[in-house]
Image (cartoon, rainbow, N blue to C red):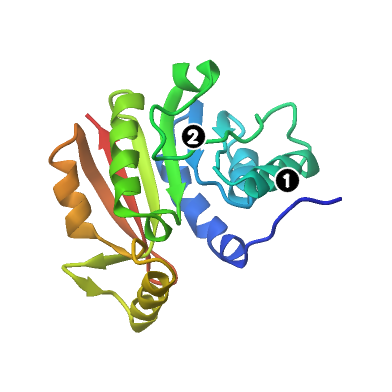
């Protein structure tokens, strides 16, 4: 049985995200993707950046099964490791030695708004603990700015998320900036993306 999942948002955003990653990612080393979902991003980026070891992860067993099925379907089994069972808030993260020893960047796509605020806090703390100096944490998704939504569609999306779970919702960029003052990490850039999304580039100092 084919266990691959297909997420429409992934098909729409993987090219613009990949184009930005091409300007940011190192020439070699390992990249840890947090909350990889279906795995479509992971196999796309492993193919696009073959010099890197792309380690996918997700706490959902159905998502991990999909990621591993995508790896097999893409004939990357000899190149790309199976997905890790990783819950951001369960620290310390159980990372393989091969990933830890050469970790250069973390990528997190569309997680912060479908998780409690404590998940964002744990992500930043663990990134600071794991990344080397100049290592990157790259976060993609919809955000608020100065307490305001950047579009009517984002406002409606935020309301629907909070209705599903009061702990969810779009995070404010100013709140993330405030969190960074307590961590050895700087905001290296904010990049406007299609469909009213933003990519944050954070650098470990």
- Position of 167 relative to 105 (above/below): below
Circle 2 residues within 10 Å: few <14, some 14–19, many ≥20: many
- Position of 19 relative to 163 (above/below): above
Which of these two is toward me, 205 or 129?
129
Whole-percent x, y for residue 84 in the image: 58, 33
- Position of 169 relative to 139 (above/below): below
Q: Quadrant of residue 7?
A: bottom right
Whole-percent x, y for residue 68 in the image: 71, 40
- In percent of the image, x 48 and y 44: which residue is there? 22
- In percent of the image, x 79 and y 44: which residue is there? 73
- In percent of the image, x 63 and y 48: which residue is there? 63
Q: Quadrant of residue 149?
A: bottom left
Total number of numbered discs in the rendering: 2
Circle 1 residues within 10 Å: few <14, some 14–19, many ≥20: many
**Quadrant where the C terminus is found in the figure:** top left
Give the label on residue 90, or none. none
Instruction: Name the residue tied to disc 1.
Output: 70
Instruction: Name the residue tied to disc 2.
Output: 32
Secondary structure beneath dot 1 equals helix
Which of these two is toward me, 21 or 86?
86
Whole-percent x, y for residue 31 in the image: 49, 33
Q: Of marks 2 and 1, which one's residue comes earlier in the chain?
A: 2
């Amino acid at each position: 049985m084919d266990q691959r999942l297909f997420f429409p948002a992934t098909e729409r955003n993987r090219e613009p995200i990949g184009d930005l990653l091409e300007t940011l990612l190192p020439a070699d080393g390992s990249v840890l993707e947090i909350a990889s979902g279906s795995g479509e991003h992971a196999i796309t980026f492993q193919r696009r950046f073959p010099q890197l070891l792309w380690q996918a992860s997700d706490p959902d067993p159905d998502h991990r099964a999909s990621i591993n099925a995508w790896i097999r379907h893409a004939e990357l089994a000899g190149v790309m490791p199976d997905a890790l069972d990783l819950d951001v808030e369960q620290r310390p993260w159980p990372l393989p030695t091969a990933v830890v020893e050469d970790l250069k960047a973390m990528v997190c796509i569309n997680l912060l708004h479908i998780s409690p605020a404590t998940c964002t806090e744990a992500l930043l703390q663990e990134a600071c603990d794991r990344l080397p100096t100049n290592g990157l944490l790259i976060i993609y998704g919809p955000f608020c700015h100065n307490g305001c939504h950047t579009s009517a569609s984002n406002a409606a999306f935020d309301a629907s998320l909070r209705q599903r779970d009061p702990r969810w919702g779009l995070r404010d960029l100013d709140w993330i900036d405030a969190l960074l003052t307590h961590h050895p990490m700087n905001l290296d850039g904010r990049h406007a993306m299609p469909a009213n999304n933003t990519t944050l580039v954070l650098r470990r100092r």
